[in-house]
Image (cartoon, rainbow, N blue to C red):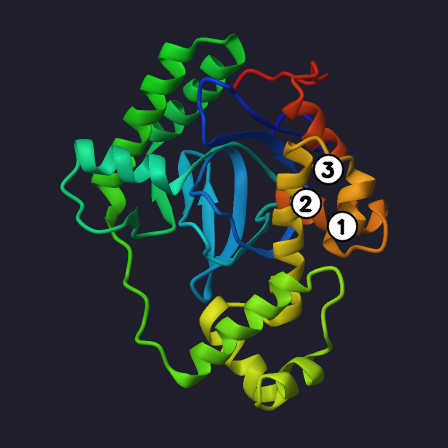
Amino acid sequence: MAGSIEQARHWRYAELPGVDLLRARYIRKTFVRHTHEHFVIAAVVDGVEVFHHGGADQYAGAGALALVNPDTPHTGRAGVPEGWRYGAVYPSPELVAEIAAETTGVRGTPGFVRPVLDDPYAVSLVHRVLRAADEGNALAADTLLRVAVTRLLRLNGGPLPQRAVRTAGAGVAARAREVLEGRMAEPPSLERLADDLGTGPFALLRAFRDVYGMPPHTWLTDARVRRARRMLDAGVSPAEAAVAVGFTDQPHLNRHFSRIVGVPPGAYQRERKNVQDTWREPF
């Protein structure tokens, strides 16, 4: 794979509302367990990405796509020494549902069935979307995105499973999540949280992992980064966002933000402000 420097650009194109865009080359980058509010459609052009998803490691090499449904815990790392190079689009659930209703027979809430799909043509479509966005070609970007999502749903789409019947454990986990969301800057200890909810620490830990796929402290870090992203999008400085969501300082936010989003918060916010970036690479 050409080049040995890790580089990434995470941005939005105003004419594709509700869609995040990414180009990246990673070698040593490791994404910790996290989730996305949007779908992940990541098209690999060189190298191999490994991501833990659904209880197993998944491998996406050149010509394949890594596909992750919203709110699905997963990780990410290089599967070969030279890392991986890819482009990704992150369409909102609302946009995917709109496309599914118009162009496919998927009933219910649409999603992807398998996390890895070998389809070089779909990979090329994703990179053509990114190129069109770079060139400011709104008609092409929107058209190609819809064609790509339609193709992926037809090849690998289906209704997402309905939420399981609510159990006592699931109820405790949901209440714990509400507490953590409300007290993000000053969360209680696991023991205090469990005591307030009338259960034991290990019972709470087990219930939370069963429902959300990660322990409360990992979920909280993920939620903090999500909230920080929204604040950065609204123009709040990284230093202010860090303190507001409960990180000790900006370097603390930087570390976790980069391990989840893939770029530092400052670079992320600059792209949101349409500041000209210093790296462009044709895919």
Q: Is residue 71 above or below residue 60?
A: below
Question: Does residue 151 appear in this view?
Answer: no
Q: Which residue is mark 2?
A: 228
Left or right relative to 22: residue 195:
right
Q: Which residue is mark 3?
A: 265
Q: Is residue 138 above or below residue 113?
A: above
Secondary element at image label 2:
helix
Residue 229 in picture, x, y percent from top left: 64, 41
Q: Residues within 10 Å of mark 2 (few under 14, many from 20)?
A: many
| Separation of marks 3 and 1 at Cα, in angstroms | 14 Å
Residue ID at (63%, 84%): 196
Image quarter of residue 168: bottom left
Seen as rendered, the residue at the extreme left is 105
What's the amino acid at mark 1? Ala
Q: Mark number for residue 196?
A: none
Q: Nearer the viewer, mark 3 or mark 2?
A: 2
Q: Report if the CB atoms under discs 2 and 1 are less than 8 Å apart.
A: yes
What's the amino acid at mark 2? Ala
Depth check, front residue: 155 or 45: 155
Q: Is residue 165 above or below residue 255?
A: below
Q: Is residue 71 above or below residue 251?
A: below
